[in-house]
Amino acid sequence: MAGQVESVEPTGQKLLSLLLVASDGRIVHAEQDLSRRWGLPLPPWKGVHVQTFMSWCLASATPFDTNTLTEATRGARELSCSLKNGRRLLVGVRSLWLSPRGVSELVGNDIWVDPAGSGQEKKFFLLSCLCIDHVAHMYRSAAEVKLRSTIGSIIAGFAHEVRNPLAAIVSLTEGVMNPDMGEETLRALSRIPVLVERIENLLKVALSYGRPRPPRASWHQLGGVLTKSLEILELAGVGTFSELLPKEHMNVPIYVDREHVISVITNLLQNAIEEAGVENVRIRVEPSPRVSGESYLYSHGAVVAVDFIDKGRGVSPENREHIFEPFFTTKSNGTGLGLALARDLARLNDGDLILLETGVGGSAFRLLLPTHAS
């Protein structure tokens, strides 16, 4: 979801990843996005037998020898299997007769060397791999984008209609206030501009959710971003956090929009502090985390994890699937947009935000940030 979220359209995206296998079972070509689509860090493939390669990727022993591939082409059937990360994979198999030049044209590189040097056509297997979970995620993300676009349009229209009356209310209130009024009347009238300001802030949050600006990513050190987030909370009067800053991995480089990530971190910290108190909150950094199946990311290793851990009440089982939904809140004065916006900003920056763990002893939210340029 990086970039302009409104541009996501699953029907315009390529769903299949291709493997080209020679008649002796050796892999001739694999598409570059295979690792991202499968959600696995893949071993070297060039010249490796397809059975060896697939055995490394799959959760169980599934035959991918040349006999199995030949039978699959004859029966026009798909091979169904499960990857090590639990995702389901469907593999369609076709047989092709190609010359060395045909192989080069198909894969875009002159990587096939004819051992006999005859230039004659040889048999190959073309494996069309479809990760079902990847497709499901893609359509789910597109549905979320369309919903948010609709919400954004509604909020924008509502904000336009409401702001003028709010300004008039503040102006009229200030106009009628004078020192001769009773103390209670003045106190009551003085509350109106404060309440109007709160409505304005709620509108700003809602507008930022409906139409977030695209990220402007650049290189930053993780420690600098964390320090700035803590400073903002201290200036806002939330508390003092001299002990919260982690002692390790502060020099990890991240490639993000600094304002976006600061917004996410301050939101997560404020939630944790409101839930458990500053003395019961800590920040933990893992420089090379494993990306779990709960994350939307389809890559591994090129992220850093920042965990925000509190000793609060935890998230109840019935609420765990809803906490990132817009307008869902358990707070009496909450908007229900904080976590939804935080996760979207993380994803816009090629990262993610997940509820890592929760229970009666508290919760841990994990923010994943890229340590590589897109």
Image: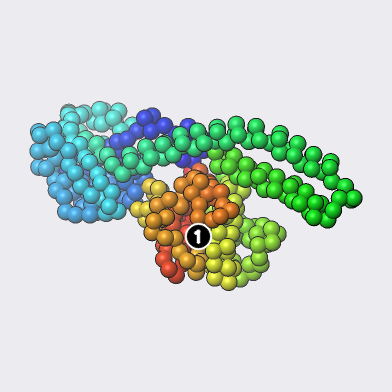
Q: Position of residue 240 (x, y in %)?
A: 66, 67
Q: Which residue is mark 1?
A: 306
Q: Position of residue 221 (x, y in %)?
A: 58, 56
Number of residue marks:
1
Q: Is residue 224 left or right of residue 23?
A: right
Foreground residue among 288 and 316:
316
Type of residue at label 1?
Val
Vertical order, 59 against 78 (above or below):
below
Packing grade of label 1 (10 A; few <14, some 14-19, many >=20) is many
Q: How is the image coloured?
A: rainbow
Q: Position of residue 350 (x, y in %)?
A: 48, 46
Which residue shows up at 19% across the image and 44% down it? Answer: 80
Residue 250 visible (yes or no): no
Vertical order, 306 against 174 (above or below):
below
Foreground residue among 57 and 105:
57
Q: Quadrant of residue 133?
A: top left
Q: Position of residue 265 (x, y in %)?
A: 57, 56
Which residue shows up at 30% across the image and 53% down it? Answer: 85
Residue 12 visible (yes or no): yes
Which residue shows up at 16% across the image and 46% down it? Answer: 64
Q: Is residue 124 left or right of residue 271?
A: left
Residue at the far right in the pictured view: 180
Vertical order, 201 against 361 (above or below):
above
Foreground residue among 211 and 257:
211
Question: What kind of element bears circle 1?
Answer: strand
Which residue shows up at 38% across the image and 40% down it? Answer: 140
Vertical order, 184 against 80 (above or below):
below
Foreground residue among 167 and 90:
167
Q: Is residue 346 left or right of residue 108?
A: right
